[in-house]
Amino acid sequence: MIPRLKPDLKISDLVSAFSFWKKNSVEKFEEAFAKKAGHMYAVAFPYGRTAMMILLQALGLKNKEIICPAYTCVVVPHAIVFSGNTPVFVDIEDSGFNMDLIAAEKLITKNTGALIATSIFGIPVNLEQLREIKRKHPNLIIIQDCAHSFMADWSGEKVHKEGIAAVFAMNISKHIHSIFGGMITTDNKDLAQKIREESEKTLNPAGLMKSFKRLLYLIAIYPTFFSPIYTLVNFLERHKLLGSLTDQFDQGIVMPTDYKDTMTEIEARVGLSQLERVDEIIENRRKIGAYYQYALKGFKKLKPQSMIEGATYSHFVAITEFRREIMDFCLKRGIQIGQLIEYSVPDLKYYQDLPGTKIDCPKARHICSRTINLPVSCSKKDAEKTIFALNEFFRDRGVLNES
Ligand SMILES: *Cc1c(COP(=O)(O)O)cnc(C)c1O
């Protein structure tokens, strides 16, 4: 089975996890992360969503409107709500998956606290447009959500450098992982200080039990992503016999029970080990992404994400009317196709119930039922198999692709 998402797992990560004699790993991870990002400061968190919540609090934002994409991971608006603020959703661009920045600008009011720029699927946010907004609204706080876009650049410039701070997420579906985890990076000394204070006030030191659970989780996922076992896991997942690997977006505005427990030393050690390979990981994804771009050119009923220099492909996404059919067809051939992100946040029932967030985002609604994502953390051979299966799917349907 070729999985739709696959963490980069090496035995060295497991060895790092078990290196119990190593001390101050969280601090070391923060230092190494800041260095890699080219930022002065980095602060680690148990989840990306916790990082986002603490950042908004550290910025002193309360009862403010936070502008964010409608088409993003649901945990981002959750973090906004938990920080005591209200999300204001922005629809996607005409051709693309990122937030429409021209529409975003129109939503800026005197109540706006910040704008969360997101490079979804690793597609870099348009920094020129973002700078234009900043020029017109010099006091606007811009936050980069880089959960999907580790090291992505727009015209040669790193997107995470544009704004007051950047938030990263490191669960096993991201470029690199620290089992679970989040990070804020910034060059602003006062803000870094406030983030530390806010996090000491809000978070509890992780206990032994959490460390033990994280270690078990890591041991469990290691064999999981090797082919035959993954087939079994996929079966269990599809039959809803396994909760933890699937994204839960239908449970209301809630956080995981341990979202306020600090990152464990074990996680930091795994993160450090992964960080050493991040360039390699990104390079491979770019190579597979470029191959898909080339191979899907002649497809008539499947539109791949635009080819943008600097994208880091947390996912390779395409739009098609045949999502369900393609997923079923490929699964029978041992290829798992994903359907990320399959919702537009303002359409989720519990966000419709939230006062002040009733914003219609028809473009996000339209694509969220039509996106598929192809395996991208895989070998060239697996990518070729995927293209072969997609070709076969359309040929069976009498849709002839141009070669
Ligand atoms: C994964 C993700 C986050 C944060 O994720 P956590 O699960 O809280 O670590 C934030 N933004 C986006 C766009 C994401 O995909």
Image (tube, rainbow, N blue to C red):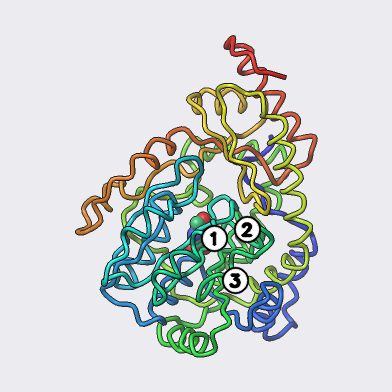
**Residue 391: x, y in percent?**
67, 20
Q: Are marks 2 and 1 in contact (CB under 8 Å)?
A: yes
Q: What residue is shown with label 3? A: 161
First reached walking from the N terminus: tag 2 or tag 3: 2
First reached walking from the N terminus: tag 1 or tag 3: 1
Location of residue 295 with respect to 138 vertically, above or below: above
Question: Disc 1 beta carbon < 8 A from ligand 1?
Answer: no
Q: Quadrant of residue 302?
A: top right
Q: CA distance from mark 1 to mark 3?
A: 13 Å
Q: Are marks 2 and 3 in contact (CB under 8 Å)?
A: no
| Quadrant holding the C terminus | top right
In this rendered view, identify the residue nearer to me: 19 or 6: 6
Location of residue 205 with respect to 375 vertically, above or below: below
Q: What residue is shown with label 2? A: 154
At 57% from the left edge and 31% from the top edge, which residue is drawn?
A: 303
Question: Disc 3 beta carbon < 8 A from ligand 1?
Answer: no
* Amino acid residing under circle 2: Trp
